[in-house]
Image: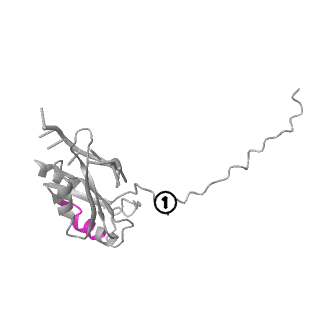
DNA sequence: GTTGAGCGTT
């Protein structure tokens, strides 16, 4: 029975509203806007396909992509998928509207997806630290004879 | 045939 596991997942509390644990992606802020129109939907049924995901999230905005990740080896669903909207507001509405909701008999969890493709216009600001200091090779060794 | 944390195949 999928309902038992679903309720178990509800009571497990995947979205724990801890004010201390403020992650960049694991935060469920009711008043904040998402930074990406891409949503990560987990808790899907193993029978849920892209069409089910699309039909479940199509009511919140225009979907660019609704994909359920299926295992290439077995060809079945991995139990999670991704939903991409046109705008982040739609994604936010979808997240607030579909988080911890039922889909195909299972409770799904909607969260902002992690950036899989690094934007070519937005390079990760990684400051290159010049490690030149502290490694001055002392060639004052004149005793090597 | 089946059992539940997670971030995908372009």
Q: Residue at x 25, y 67 (%)?
A: A94
Determine whether, in the image, residue A36 is placed left or right of residue A137: left
A135 versus A40 height, above or below: above
Q: Residue at x 40, y 54 (%)?
A: A116
Choose between A72 and A104: the one closer to the eye.
A72
State the predominant SS element of the stretch in magenta.
Answer: helix
Find the residue positioned furthest to the top.
Answer: A145
Find the residue positioned furthest to the left.
Answer: A1
Q: Residue A79, position in %: x, y?
A: 23, 49
Determine whether, in the image, residue A125 is placed left or right of residue A142: left
Q: Residue A93, position in %: x, y?
A: 27, 70
Residue density around tag 1, few if under 14, some if 14–19, many if 20 or more, within 10 Å: few
Label 1 resides on the chain identified as: A
Q: Residue at x 34, y 68 (%)?
A: A29
**Number of dots carrying numbers:** 1
Which quarter of the figure has residue A125?
bottom right
Is-magenta flag for residue A17? no
Scheme of image coloration:
one colour
Determine whether, in the image, residue A143 is placed left or right of residue A25: right
A12 versus A84 height, above or below: above
Check the picture and name the quadrant holding the C terminus of chain A: top right
User: In terms of secondary structure, where does tag 1 sit?
Assistant: loop
Choose between A27 and A16: the one closer to the eye.
A27
Choose between A31 and A51: the one closer to the eye.
A51
Determine whether, in the image, residue A134 is placed left or right of residue A82: right
Is-magenta flag for residue A98? yes
Question: Which residue corresponds to mark 1?
Answer: A120
Q: Which residues are magenta?
A: A92-101
Which quarter of the figure has residue A61?
bottom left
Q: Residue A129, position in %: x, y?
A: 64, 54
Q: Residue A101, position in %: x, y?
A: 19, 61
């Amino acid at each position: 029975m999928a309902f038992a596991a679903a309720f178990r997942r509800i009571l497990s509390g995947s979205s724990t509203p801890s004010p201390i644990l403020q992650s960049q992606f694991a935060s469920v802020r009711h008043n904040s806007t998402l930074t990406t129109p891409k949503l990560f939907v987990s808790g899907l049924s193993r029978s849920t396909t892209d069409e089910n995901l699309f039909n479940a999230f199509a009511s919140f905005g225009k979907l660019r992509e609704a994909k359920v990740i299926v295992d290439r080896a077995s060809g079945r669903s991995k139990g999670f998928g991704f939903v991409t909207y046109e705008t982040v507001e739609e994604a936010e509405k979808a997240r607030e509207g579909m988080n911890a909701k039922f889909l195909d008999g299972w409770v799904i969890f909607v969260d902002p997806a992690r950036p899989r493709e690094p934007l070519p216009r937005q390079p990760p600001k990684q400051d290159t630290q010049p490690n030149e200091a502290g490694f001055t090779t002392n060639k004052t060794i004149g005793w090597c004879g």
